[in-house]
């Protein structure tokens, strides 16, 4: 049974849920969204066995990411309730986690969540 919590010692799955506004630029098709979850210590959460890796930004810089999510985009339509789950073997730290989302080398969103 799943239950939402903000207590670091009780978190089993870190779930990031977000929406994408109406698509006016990108062509229709399946797109990769690169999700970065940065711990309060400043370390990027990564595990190659769970899909972590690296990609390039629009200006040619290397960007490490936590996980990637494929979605289907259609021009002129928003996409709602995109959900990305992150599991890790060790416990989560207390503090503010930064979440960044990239598509085609551009940051398209960011947020933070505080675990106590």
Image (cartoon, rainbow, N blue to C red):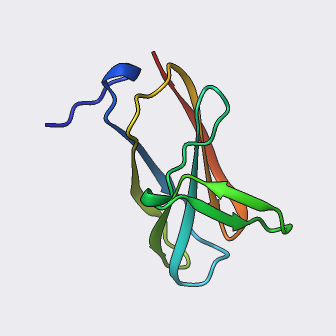
Q: Residue furthest bottom?
A: 28
Q: Residue furthest right?
A: 59
Judge from the rendering whether residue 84 lies leftward or rightward of residue 28; answer left or right.
left
**Position of residue 43 measured from the top left corner of the image (x, y, whole percent):** 64, 36
Please say if 1 is above or below 62. Answer: above
**Position of residue 90 measured from the top left corner of the image (x, y, whole percent):** 41, 33
Please say if 83 is above or below 94. Answer: below
Please tell me which residue is depicted at 34% across the width and 29% down the height of the picture.
11
Residue 65, image quadrant: bottom right
Q: Residue furthest left?
A: 1
Residue 57, image quadrant: bottom right
Quadrant of the snapshot with the N terminus? top left
Judge from the rendering whether residue 106 lies leftward or rightward of residue 18; answer left or right.
right
Foreground pick, 43 / 75: 43
Quadrant of the snapshot with the C terminus? top left
Q: Residue furthest top?
A: 116
Please tell me which residue is depicted at 64% across the width and 77% down the height of the picture.
26
**Position of residue 109 measured from the top left corner of the image (x, y, whole percent):** 63, 50
For the image shown, how many numbered marks are present on the structure?
0
**Position of residue 97 measured from the top left corner of the image (x, y, whole percent):** 56, 31
Please tell me which residue is depicted at 50% across the width and 79% down the height of the picture.
74
Foreground pick, 47 / 103: 47
Foreground pick, 75 / 2: 2
Please say if 101 is above or below 56. Answer: above
Foreground pick, 99 / 72: 99
Please tell me which residue is depicted at 31% across the width and 23% down the height of the picture.
10
């Amino acid at each position: 049974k799943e239950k939402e919590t903000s207590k670091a010692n009780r978190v089993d799955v870190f779930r990031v849920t977000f929406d994408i506004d109406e698509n006016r630029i990108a062509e229709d098709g399946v797109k990769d969204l690169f999700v970065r979850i940065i711990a309060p210590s400043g370390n990027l959460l990564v595990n190659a066995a769970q899909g972590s890796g690296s990609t390039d930004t629009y200006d040619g810089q290397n960007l490490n990411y936590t996980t990637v999510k494929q979605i289907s985009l259609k021009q002129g339509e928003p996409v709602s309730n995109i959900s990305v789950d992150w599991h890790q073997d060790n416990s989560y730290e207390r503090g503010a986690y930064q979440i960044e989302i990239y598509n085609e080398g551009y940051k398209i969103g960011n947020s933070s969540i505080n675990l106590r």
